[in-house]
Protein backbone atom coordinates (compact mmCIF):
# COMPACT_ATOMS: atom_id res chain seq x y z
CA UNK A 1 0.00 0.00 0.00
CA UNK A 2 1.48 3.32 -1.08
CA UNK A 3 1.69 6.50 0.95
CA UNK A 4 -1.25 8.09 -0.85
CA UNK A 5 -3.39 4.98 -0.44
CA UNK A 6 -2.57 4.79 3.26
CA UNK A 7 -3.32 8.50 3.70
CA UNK A 8 -6.63 8.08 1.87
CA UNK A 9 -7.50 5.10 4.07
CA UNK A 10 -6.70 7.03 7.25
CA UNK A 11 -8.77 10.01 6.11
CA UNK A 12 -11.74 7.79 5.26
CA UNK A 13 -11.45 6.10 8.64
CA UNK A 14 -11.43 9.44 10.45
CA UNK A 15 -14.40 10.70 8.45
CA UNK A 16 -16.37 7.52 9.09
CA UNK A 17 -15.61 7.75 12.80
CA UNK A 18 -16.85 11.35 12.92
CA UNK A 19 -19.98 10.47 10.95
CA UNK A 20 -20.70 7.50 13.21
CA UNK A 21 -20.48 9.70 16.29
CA UNK A 22 -22.75 12.36 14.81
CA UNK A 23 -25.22 9.91 13.26
CA UNK A 24 -28.69 9.88 14.76
CA UNK A 25 -30.30 6.40 14.52
CA UNK A 26 -33.77 7.94 14.38
CA UNK A 27 -32.85 10.11 11.42
CA UNK A 28 -31.22 7.12 9.70
CA UNK A 29 -34.37 5.02 10.14
CA UNK A 30 -36.57 7.81 8.84
CA UNK A 31 -34.28 8.29 5.85
CA UNK A 32 -34.33 4.56 5.03
CA UNK A 33 -38.10 4.55 5.33
CA UNK A 34 -38.39 7.46 2.92
CA UNK A 35 -36.04 5.70 0.50
CA UNK A 36 -38.29 2.63 0.49
CA UNK A 37 -41.33 4.81 -0.09
CA UNK A 38 -39.56 6.46 -3.03
CA UNK A 39 -38.79 3.03 -4.47
CA UNK A 40 -42.42 2.07 -4.06
CA UNK A 41 -43.47 5.19 -5.93
CA UNK A 42 -41.03 4.34 -8.72
CA UNK A 43 -42.51 0.83 -8.98
CA UNK A 44 -46.03 2.24 -9.08
CA UNK A 45 -44.99 4.70 -11.77
CA UNK A 46 -43.44 1.87 -13.79
CA UNK A 47 -46.65 -0.15 -13.48
CA UNK A 48 -48.67 2.85 -14.61
CA UNK A 49 -46.39 3.38 -17.63
CA UNK A 50 -46.63 -0.29 -18.61
CA UNK A 51 -50.38 -0.26 -18.21
CA UNK A 52 -50.60 2.82 -20.39
CA UNK A 53 -48.45 1.20 -23.09
CA UNK A 54 -50.48 -1.99 -22.91
CA UNK A 55 -53.71 -0.01 -23.26
CA UNK A 56 -52.36 1.69 -26.37
CA UNK A 57 -51.47 -1.66 -27.91
CA UNK A 58 -54.91 -3.01 -27.03
CA UNK A 59 -56.53 -0.01 -28.71
CA UNK A 60 -54.36 -0.55 -31.78
CA UNK A 61 -55.30 -4.24 -31.75
CA UNK A 62 -59.01 -3.41 -31.65
CA UNK A 63 -58.58 -1.11 -34.64
CA UNK A 64 -56.78 -3.85 -36.57
CA UNK A 65 -59.54 -6.28 -35.67
CA UNK A 66 -62.06 -3.81 -37.02
CA UNK A 67 -60.02 -3.57 -40.24
CA UNK A 68 -59.96 -7.36 -40.46
CA UNK A 69 -63.72 -7.43 -40.31
CA UNK A 70 -63.85 -4.64 -42.86
CA UNK A 71 -61.52 -6.41 -45.32
CA UNK A 72 -63.42 -9.65 -44.81
CA UNK A 73 -66.65 -7.90 -45.74
CA UNK A 74 -64.97 -6.29 -48.76
CA UNK A 75 -63.79 -9.70 -49.96
CA UNK A 76 -67.32 -11.14 -49.62
CA UNK A 77 -68.82 -8.26 -51.59
CA UNK A 78 -66.15 -8.63 -54.32
CA UNK A 79 -66.91 -12.35 -54.65
CA UNK A 80 -70.62 -11.59 -54.97
CA UNK A 81 -69.77 -9.21 -57.84
CA UNK A 82 -67.44 -11.73 -59.46
CA UNK A 83 -64.44 -9.53 -58.74
CA UNK A 84 -61.93 -12.08 -57.61
CA UNK A 85 -59.09 -9.64 -58.00
CA UNK A 86 -60.69 -7.25 -55.50
CA UNK A 87 -61.55 -10.11 -53.21
CA UNK A 88 -57.91 -11.28 -53.32
CA UNK A 89 -56.62 -7.79 -52.47
CA UNK A 90 -59.08 -7.52 -49.56
CA UNK A 91 -58.03 -10.89 -48.23
CA UNK A 92 -54.35 -9.95 -48.49
CA UNK A 93 -54.95 -6.81 -46.41
CA UNK A 94 -56.93 -8.92 -43.98
CA UNK A 95 -53.97 -11.27 -43.64
CA UNK A 96 -51.57 -8.39 -43.01
CA UNK A 97 -53.83 -6.99 -40.32
CA UNK A 98 -54.12 -10.40 -38.68
CA UNK A 99 -50.34 -10.75 -38.64
CA UNK A 100 -50.09 -7.33 -36.98
CA UNK A 101 -52.71 -8.40 -34.47
CA UNK A 102 -50.63 -11.48 -33.60
CA UNK A 103 -47.56 -9.29 -33.06
CA UNK A 104 -49.58 -6.93 -30.87
CA UNK A 105 -50.95 -9.82 -28.87
CA UNK A 106 -47.40 -11.02 -28.24
CA UNK A 107 -46.32 -7.53 -27.10
CA UNK A 108 -49.42 -7.14 -24.98
CA UNK A 109 -48.75 -10.51 -23.35
CA UNK A 110 -45.14 -9.49 -22.63
CA UNK A 111 -46.28 -6.20 -21.13
CA UNK A 112 -48.89 -8.02 -19.10
CA UNK A 113 -46.23 -10.36 -17.72
CA UNK A 114 -43.97 -7.45 -16.85
CA UNK A 115 -46.89 -5.66 -15.28
CA UNK A 116 -47.84 -8.69 -13.21
CA UNK A 117 -44.22 -9.02 -12.09
CA UNK A 118 -44.09 -5.36 -11.07
CA UNK A 119 -47.39 -5.68 -9.26
CA UNK A 120 -46.01 -8.61 -7.28
CA UNK A 121 -42.87 -6.63 -6.45
CA UNK A 122 -45.00 -3.66 -5.53
CA UNK A 123 -47.08 -5.74 -3.14
CA UNK A 124 -43.95 -7.31 -1.66
CA UNK A 125 -42.34 -3.89 -1.28
CA UNK A 126 -45.47 -2.53 0.37
CA UNK A 127 -45.40 -5.38 2.87
CA UNK A 128 -41.71 -4.74 3.54
CA UNK A 129 -42.36 -1.05 4.01
CA UNK A 130 -45.17 -1.74 6.43
CA UNK A 131 -42.99 -4.15 8.40
CA UNK A 132 -40.09 -1.72 8.33
CA UNK A 133 -42.36 1.10 9.49
CA UNK A 134 -43.49 -0.97 12.47
CA UNK A 135 -39.91 -1.95 13.27
CA UNK A 136 -38.76 1.63 12.77
CA UNK A 137 -41.27 3.03 15.24
CA UNK A 138 -40.35 0.30 17.71
CA UNK A 139 -36.62 1.05 17.35
CA UNK A 140 -37.24 4.77 17.67
CA UNK A 141 -39.25 4.22 20.84
CA UNK A 142 -36.51 2.00 22.26
CA UNK A 143 -33.83 4.53 21.31
CA UNK A 144 -35.75 7.42 22.87
CA UNK A 145 -36.26 5.38 26.04
CA UNK A 146 -32.56 4.47 26.16
CA UNK A 147 -31.58 8.08 25.50
CA UNK A 148 -33.86 9.33 28.27
CA UNK A 149 -32.49 6.70 30.63
CA UNK A 150 -28.93 7.73 29.75
CA UNK A 151 -29.74 11.40 30.37
CA UNK A 152 -31.28 10.57 33.74
CA UNK A 153 -28.26 8.47 34.68
CA UNK A 154 -25.89 11.22 33.60
CA UNK A 155 -27.88 13.76 35.57
CA UNK A 156 -27.84 11.57 38.68
CA UNK A 157 -24.13 10.80 38.43
CA UNK A 158 -23.13 14.26 37.18
CA UNK A 159 -21.37 12.72 34.19
CA UNK A 160 -23.25 14.68 31.53
CA UNK A 161 -21.90 17.81 29.85
CA UNK A 162 -24.77 19.91 31.19
CA UNK A 163 -24.28 18.69 34.74
CA UNK A 164 -20.55 19.31 34.40
CA UNK A 165 -21.24 22.91 33.37
CA UNK A 166 -23.68 23.28 36.27
CA UNK A 167 -21.11 21.87 38.71
CA UNK A 168 -18.49 24.32 37.46
CA UNK A 169 -20.96 27.19 37.78
CA UNK A 170 -21.82 26.17 41.34
CA UNK A 171 -18.13 25.89 42.22
CA UNK A 172 -17.39 29.36 40.80
CA UNK A 173 -20.38 30.81 42.66
CA UNK A 174 -19.18 29.16 45.88
CA UNK A 175 -15.68 30.59 45.44
CA UNK A 176 -17.03 34.07 44.68
CA UNK A 177 -19.31 33.91 47.72
CA UNK A 178 -16.47 32.84 50.01
CA UNK A 179 -14.25 35.63 48.66
CA UNK A 180 -16.99 38.20 49.22
CA UNK A 181 -17.65 36.90 52.75
CA UNK A 182 -13.92 37.10 53.54
CA UNK A 183 -13.77 40.63 52.16
CA UNK A 184 -16.79 41.70 54.19
CA UNK A 185 -15.28 40.18 57.37
CA UNK A 186 -11.99 41.98 56.70
CA UNK A 187 -13.78 45.29 56.21
CA UNK A 188 -15.71 44.81 59.47
CA UNK A 189 -12.48 44.00 61.31
CA UNK A 190 -10.72 47.10 59.95
CA UNK A 191 -13.71 49.27 60.79
CA UNK A 192 -13.82 47.98 64.37
CA UNK A 193 -10.09 48.58 64.81
CA UNK A 194 -10.53 52.21 63.71
CA UNK A 195 -8.34 51.87 60.64
CA UNK A 196 -11.00 53.57 58.50
CA UNK A 197 -11.78 56.34 60.96
CA UNK A 198 -9.27 58.76 59.48
CA UNK A 199 -10.51 58.05 56.00
CA UNK A 200 -14.15 58.58 56.92
CA UNK A 201 -13.67 61.57 59.26
CA UNK A 202 -13.33 65.15 57.94
CA UNK A 203 -11.27 66.25 60.97
CA UNK A 204 -7.48 66.30 60.99
CA UNK A 205 -5.31 64.68 63.68
CA UNK A 206 -4.60 68.09 65.19
CA UNK A 207 -8.31 68.87 65.43
CA UNK A 208 -8.96 65.63 67.25
CA UNK A 209 -6.07 66.15 69.69
CA UNK A 210 -7.22 69.70 70.49
CA UNK A 211 -10.77 68.48 70.98
CA UNK A 212 -9.51 65.86 73.42
CA UNK A 213 -7.54 68.53 75.32
CA UNK A 214 -10.57 70.78 75.50
CA UNK A 215 -12.81 67.99 76.76
CA UNK A 216 -10.16 67.01 79.33
CA UNK A 217 -9.95 70.61 80.54
CA UNK A 218 -13.71 70.81 80.91
CA UNK A 219 -13.77 67.58 82.89
CA UNK A 220 -10.94 68.83 85.17
CA UNK A 221 -12.73 72.16 85.73
CA UNK A 222 -15.98 70.40 86.59
CA UNK A 223 -14.09 68.10 88.97
CA UNK A 224 -12.50 71.08 90.76
CA UNK A 225 -15.90 72.71 91.09
CA UNK A 226 -17.35 69.59 92.68
CA UNK A 227 -14.40 69.34 95.04
CA UNK A 228 -14.74 73.01 96.03
CA UNK A 229 -18.44 72.64 96.72
CA UNK A 230 -17.79 69.54 98.78
CA UNK A 231 -15.10 71.38 100.83
CA UNK A 232 -17.39 74.35 101.43
CA UNK A 233 -20.21 72.17 102.75
CA UNK A 234 -17.91 70.24 105.15
CA UNK A 235 -16.14 73.24 106.72
CA UNK A 236 -17.81 75.18 109.53
CA UNK A 237 -17.46 78.94 109.30
CA UNK A 238 -16.00 80.87 112.26
CA UNK A 239 -17.88 84.00 113.07
CA UNK A 240 -16.05 86.96 114.75
CA UNK A 241 -17.53 89.52 117.05
CA UNK A 242 -18.56 91.79 114.24
CA UNK A 243 -20.64 89.00 112.69
CA UNK A 244 -18.26 88.41 109.79
CA UNK A 245 -17.24 84.90 108.66
CA UNK A 246 -13.74 84.04 107.56
CA UNK A 247 -13.46 81.10 105.18
CA UNK A 248 -10.05 79.75 104.26
CA UNK A 249 -10.03 77.72 101.10
CA UNK A 250 -6.93 75.73 100.66
CA UNK A 251 -5.99 75.20 97.07
CA UNK A 252 -4.06 72.26 95.76
CA UNK A 253 -0.57 72.81 94.63
CA UNK A 254 -0.62 74.31 91.19
CA UNK A 255 -4.41 74.88 91.22
CA UNK A 256 -5.77 78.26 90.32
CA UNK A 257 -8.76 79.97 91.83
CA UNK A 258 -12.08 79.55 90.08
CA UNK A 259 -12.12 83.16 89.01
CA UNK A 260 -8.72 82.93 87.38
CA UNK A 261 -9.62 79.59 85.72
CA UNK A 262 -12.83 81.06 84.43
CA UNK A 263 -10.89 83.94 83.03
CA UNK A 264 -8.42 81.65 81.30
CA UNK A 265 -11.03 79.48 79.59
CA UNK A 266 -11.99 82.02 76.87
CA UNK A 267 -8.33 82.51 76.02
CA UNK A 268 -7.84 78.78 75.57
CA UNK A 269 -10.96 78.58 73.43
CA UNK A 270 -9.68 81.46 71.29
CA UNK A 271 -6.33 79.73 70.76
CA UNK A 272 -8.04 76.51 69.84
CA UNK A 273 -10.23 78.31 67.32
CA UNK A 274 -7.12 79.93 65.78
CA UNK A 275 -5.45 76.53 65.48
CA UNK A 276 -8.55 75.09 63.81
CA UNK A 277 -8.67 77.98 61.33
CA UNK A 278 -4.98 77.50 60.50
CA UNK A 279 -5.47 73.78 59.96
CA UNK A 280 -8.44 74.35 57.65
Image (tube, rainbow, N blue to C red):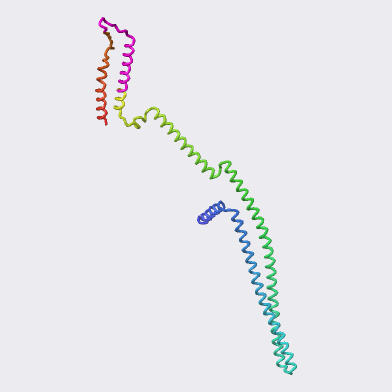
> Which quadrant of the structure image shows residue 183?
top left
> Which quadrant of the structure image shows residue 234?
top left
**Percent position of residue 250, x then y:** 28, 10
Quadrant placement of the C terminus: top left
Give the side of residue 24 with respect to residue 278, left or right. Answer: right
SS majority, magenta: helix
Is 180 drawn above or below residue 12 in the view shown? Answer: above
Give the side of residue 32 with respect to residue 278, left or right. Answer: right
Tell me, yes or no, whether the highlighted magenta stretch contains residue 83: no
Residue at figure coordinates x 27%, y 28% from the top left: 276
Q: Nearer the viewer, residue 209 or 234?
A: 234
Give the side of residue 197 with respect to residue 60, left or right. Answer: left
Question: Magenta residues, as a range?
Answer: 214-243
**Percent position of residue 245, x then y:** 27, 8
Q: Nearer the viewer, residue 90 or 27?
A: 27
Tell me, yes or no, whether the highlighted magenta stretch contains residue 227: yes
Give the side of residue 58 with respect to residue 186, left or right. Answer: right
**Percent position of residue 223, x then y:** 33, 17
Residue at figure coordinates x 31%, y 26% from the top left: 208
Is 144 drawn above or below residue 277 in the view shown? Answer: below
Residue at the limit of the structure toward the front, as seen here: 242
Q: Nearer the viewer, residue 180 or 75?
A: 180
Quadrant placement of the N terminus: bottom right
Residue at the limit of the structure toward the bottom, as seen here: 82
**Percent position of residue 109, x then y:** 70, 74
Is 178 drawn above or below residue 235 in the view shown? Answer: below
Amino acid sequence: MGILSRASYVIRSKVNAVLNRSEDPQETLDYSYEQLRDELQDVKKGIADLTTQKKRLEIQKRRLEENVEKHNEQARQAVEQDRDDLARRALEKKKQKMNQIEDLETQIADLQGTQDNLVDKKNELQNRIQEFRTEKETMKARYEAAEASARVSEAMTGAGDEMENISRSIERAREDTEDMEARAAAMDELEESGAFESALSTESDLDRELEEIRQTGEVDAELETLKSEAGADGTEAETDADGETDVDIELEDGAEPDAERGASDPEIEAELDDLKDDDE
